[in-house]
Image (cartoon, coloured by chain):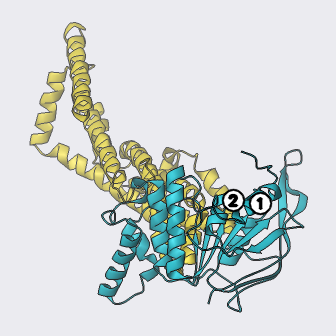
């Protein structure tokens, strides 16, 4: 379970620009094509990393997979079912402020389990996942009382406690300091090996993709949205410097994203 | 730090009273025009002891409470609705923006005609003074909620009721409390004015009645009590806004 099929998906926005001279919001109607003919297939349990420059539509694609937005044309299927609306089977992990800030860590993690009738089971499960992300002792803290890394871990606990078929992460490490970034990345890799669910991650960081991914997708601007789609068959944990093939792939990816990797 | 600021405000009030005493002592004013602090204090004690002061305070607070609660009860749900429904907002907002700048005091003739004499017109004026600012503040707070929270809600299959209870209300609470704090100050301003017209009780009536009797000492007692209660109302709102689950937006 957790197989994703993206079939010939396109996304166009009608850009209604405000015209100052005529005071009319509808005078300049311009269609902006973000995605065009995107077809991808992700296997069950795969860790997929999507790379690409800002504005190439990778976050839009992610939101469509989660059901927050609909495609202008084409189909997105998860386990052969078309995605119509958001569901707790596919949990989205947000880039910023994904925790509800007026709820404690405990209450946030409880969100996905709030319909569970067995109080004992509910309490035990919540505690188990809070412990898993090493937030024991912080159950009654509010998000603004936690560091950025702790907030991400709490959100991760909230996401995996519902045992979703699919985890969707939008730049999960952005804004973290260097060491926290590396630790979080390691935790996500470990978590993936533990829960064995499909995870789709959008990132700007080539090293993230190389260390984490079972499949790397490089996206570009429409109409050529999918620049590269490659399976990565390397065992974890990976050390980019020491694994033949990863270093070469890194240089290739840097070139593909428009940077001559030298330093 | 907190003790220091308390000490400083006590000091500034003491200085004000000393200045007032010196001014009246050497200023050669008649007690009818500018009574001394001692005289005002004596009148205050007298009014307090015979119970009239408390009676007027209760009358004023009653009107503010009822008018204010009505405004909260109607204004905040309306604001939530306007914030959520773009079409309704475009329909209703122009009317609200038009009525909002009309001072509640301009409504006095109509209020008396519609509601007669007594508590009702005063409560109506309080309601008007609080209702529009609350609607506007709530509408703005709702429409500026971070869309991520609604995504989270749909991701975890929230029902409409849960979206209102667990997302919208807590999300707007800090801003709404700020609006309540500003609004209760306006309501308190308006009640005194309203009581000078249509009623026979309340701090506004006390002041008007004392003026007619040329008792400026009682006028000043009324003013001082109004000021003290205003500060008290503000402090209560500040306390509310500092609760952790409400003040989720404060800097860590």
- Using the image as rendered, state which of residue B159 and residue B29 is in the foreground: B159
* Chain ID for yellow: B
Residue at 36% over, 90% down: A117
Which quarter shows the C terminus of chain A? top right
Q: Position of residue A210 (x, y in %)?
A: 66, 65
Indicate which disc, 2 or 1, sits on the residue closer to the N terminus. Answer: 2
**Disc number placed over residue A206 in the picture, else none:** 2
Q: Where is residue B9 in the image (x, y as percent from the top left)?
A: 26, 28
Residue B75 in sight: no
Is A77 on the left-hand or right-hand side of A93? right
Q: SS class of the residue under badge 2? A: helix
Q: State which chain disc 1 sits on.
A: A
Q: Residue farthest to the bottom? A: A80
Q: Where is residue A103 in the image (x, y as percent from the top left)?
A: 41, 65
- Using the image as rendered, state which of residue B118 and residue A145 is in the foreground: A145
Residue at 21% over, 28% down: B7
Q: From the image, tell me which residue sits under label 1.
A: A253
Q: Where is residue B145 in the image (x, y as percent from the top left)?
A: 56, 60
Q: SS class of the residue under badge 1? A: helix
């Amino acid at each position: 379970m957790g197989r994703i099929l993206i079939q010939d998906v396109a996304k166009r926005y009608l850009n209604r620009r405000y015209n100052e001279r005529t005071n009319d919001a509808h005078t300049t109607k311009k269609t902006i094509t973000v995605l065009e003919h995107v077809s991808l297939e992700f296997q069950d349990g795969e860790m997929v990393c999507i790379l690409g420059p800002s504005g190439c539509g990778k976050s839009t694609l992610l939101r469509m997979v989660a059901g927050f937005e609909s495609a202008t044309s084409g189909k997105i299927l998860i386990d052969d079912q078309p995605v119509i609306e958001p569901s707790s089977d596919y949990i989205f992990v947000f880039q910023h402020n994904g925790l509800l800030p007026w709820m404690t860590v405990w209450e946030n993690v409880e969100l996905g389990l709030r319909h569970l009738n067995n109080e004992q089971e509910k309490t035990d499960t919540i505690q188990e996942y809070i412990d898993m992300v090493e937030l024991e002792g912080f159950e009654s803290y509010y998000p603004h009382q936690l560091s950025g890394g702790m907030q991400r871990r709490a959100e991760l606990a909230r996401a995996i406690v519902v045992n979703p078929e699919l985890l969707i992460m939008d730049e999960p490490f952005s804004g973290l300091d260097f060491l926290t970034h590396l630790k979080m990345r390691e935790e996500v890799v470990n978590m993936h090996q533990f829960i064995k669910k499909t995870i789709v991650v959008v990132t700007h960081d080539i090293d993230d993709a190389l260390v984490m991914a079972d499949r790397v997708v490089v996206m570009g601007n429409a109409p050529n949205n999918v620049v590269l789609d490659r399976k990565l068959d390397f065992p974890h944990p990976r050390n980019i410097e020491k694994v033949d093939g990863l270093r070469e792939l890194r240089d290739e990816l840097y070139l593909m994203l428009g940077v001559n990797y030298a330093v | 730090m907190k003790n220091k600021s308390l000490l400083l405000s006590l000091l500034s009030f003491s200085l004000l009273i000393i200045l007032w005493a010196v001014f009246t002592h050497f200023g050669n004013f008649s007690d009818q025009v500018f009574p001394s602090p001692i005289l005002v204090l004596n009148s205050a004690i007298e009014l307090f002891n015979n119970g009239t002061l408390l009676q007027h305070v209760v009358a004023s607070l009653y009107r503010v409470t009822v008018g204010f609660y009505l405004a909260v009860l109607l204004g905040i749900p309306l604001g939530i609705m306007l914030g959520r429904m773009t079409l309704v907002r475009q329909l209703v907002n122009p009317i609200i923006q038009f009525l909002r700048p009309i001072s509640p005091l301009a409504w006095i003739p109509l209020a008396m005609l519609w509601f007669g004499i007594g508590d009702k017109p005063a409560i109506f004026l309080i309601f008007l003074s609080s209702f529009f600012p609350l609607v506007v503040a709530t509408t703005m707070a709702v429409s500026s909620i971070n869309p991520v929270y609604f995504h989270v809600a749909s991701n975890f299959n929230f029902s409409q009721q849960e979206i209102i209870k667990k997302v919208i209300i807590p999300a707007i609470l800090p801003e709404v409390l700020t609006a309540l704090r500003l609004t209760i100050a306006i309501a308190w301003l308006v009640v005194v004015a309203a009581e000078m017209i249509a009623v026979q009780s309340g701090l506004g009536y006390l002041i008007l009645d004392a003026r007619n009797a040329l008792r400026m000492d009682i006028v000043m007692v009324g003013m001082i009590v109004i000021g003290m209660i205003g500060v008290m109302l503000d402090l209560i709102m500040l306390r509310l806004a500092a609760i952790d689950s409400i003040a989720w937006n404060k800097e860590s």
